[in-house]
Image (cartoon, rainbow, N blue to C red):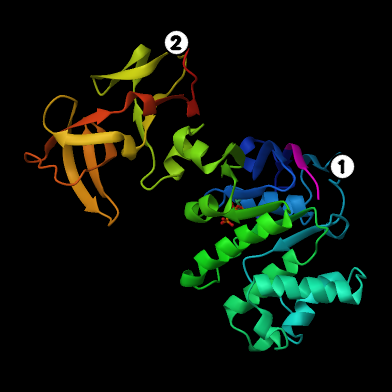
Amino acid sequence: MARITLDKLAHSYKPNPSGPGDYALKEIDHVWRQGGAYALLGPSGCGKTTLLNIISGLVTPTRGRILFDDDDVTGRPTEARNIAQVFQFPVVYDTMTVRENLAFPLKNRGVARDVIRRRVDEIAGLLDLTRSLDRKASNLTADAKQKISLGRGLVRPDVAAILFDEPLTVIDPHLKWQLRSTLKELHRRLDITMIYVTHDQTEALTFADTVVVMHDGAVVQAGTPDQLFDRPAHTFVGHFIGSPGMNVLPCRVDGALATVEGHPVTLAHAYPALDAARVELGIRPEFIRLAPRGAGLPVRVRRIDDIGRARIARVELGACALSAMAPDGVALDGDEASLSLDPSRIHVYADGRLVAPA
Ligand code: ATP
């Protein structure tokens, strides 16, 4: 097992990259703690798979280094890195039994027979594959085949890390929850660094202790699910995480007072003078109270969506559209209402980045 360090890592698929737009990854510095459960989360095309493939050695970065503990492995092939990787689609040998498939990565490394048997039995038990051990893989469903792929990744006790690239894509939706919690349980028991790529925030937040959020080839924040929710370091993170995401409102800020669409908004702290092209307030819908017309910011209610667990109001404050939670039993007078914002939950952003109070 190892700590994995990315040192100024950049990658372009173009032979002669010139500008930042030519790079799939742009100078990433990040440390993956030994034994951590990580999710690598971001929208399609932000560079997650490229980063994973650089860690495993399938792709050599254009610039920068990758270290396992203090060992520079940048130019080393996958076989020499001691990494297990599980892909979106199952990689199994159809002609082998489940037991032979699970044993393969150990047999290949010359592990003793009785050790292999014990380890295969343990992993099969954890993945609920025990009853299928003697069946040929070709006779199994796509779900079971992907479980075998997971098992082949997990079976090696000595790996530096296991990398999962959207491993539950082919899994039946009702089994996803179950497998995700199985993986979490396996992480607790096996204490192996796991990096789980996904563009699904629910998958990321339920699996990981630390979620690493990527946007446009860069890591924009790494933190616990609570940190990402409570203190998004970038407007992108606030917007991407949450359902609906954080509201981002253009504003002016003067000390502890902001002005949004000509209306004053009190902040919990004073801020330094901001010299930025864009200054914005961020506040999550959960911390905005919608009330009948009265004190507060005057808004027009465009729509209220009942999503079962909550009612979400889509409102307009001047030219700004935002979301707010609509408490049950609020009787609105026509479409006019007012909003109150919890000052302790308002964040200030300059050019997309979180600003610390003065
Ligand atoms: P997804 O969730 O859709 O898999 P991702 O976040 O994993 O996306 P990558 O697959 O790493 O993103 O792609 C990052 C960028 O690099 C994208 O613009 C993609 O088009 C480009 N890219 C990826 N693989 C190659 C390749 N083999 N050759 C050229 N460009 C590539």
Q: Amino acid at mark 1?
A: Asp
Please say whether residue 49 is visible from this viewpoint.
no
Q: Amino acid at mark 2?
A: Ala
State which region is magenta. Answer: 1-8
Q: Is residue 58 left or right of residue 250?
A: right
- Taking depth in this image into account, of 13 and 163 the one nearest to the observer is 163
Instruction: Determine crowd level at label 2: few under 14, some 14-19, many 20+ residues with C-alpha closer than 10 A.
Output: few
Please say whether residue 307 is visible from this viewpoint.
yes
Give the mark nearest the N terminus, 1 or 2.
Answer: 1
Find disc 1 in the rendering and name its residue: 72
Main structural element of the magenta stretch: helix, strand or loop? strand
- Taking depth in this image into account, of 138 and 351 the one nearest to the observer is 138
Residue at the spot 35% in from the left edge and 26% down from the top edge: 250
Count of numbered tags: 2
Does the stretch in magenta take in 354?
A: no
Mark 1 Cβ inside 8 Å of ligand 1: no
Quarter of the image where one finds residue 241? top left
Q: Position of residue 6 (x, y in %)?
A: 74, 40
Q: Residue furthest left?
A: 333
Q: Position of residue 55 (x, y in %)?
A: 75, 50
Residue at the spot 64% in from the left edge and 89% down from the top edge: 139
Q: Measure how far apart labels 1 and 2 are at the Cα level.
A: 43 Å
Which secondary structure, mark 1?
strand
Find disc 2 in the rendering and name its residue: 273
Quarter of the image where one finds residue 323? top left
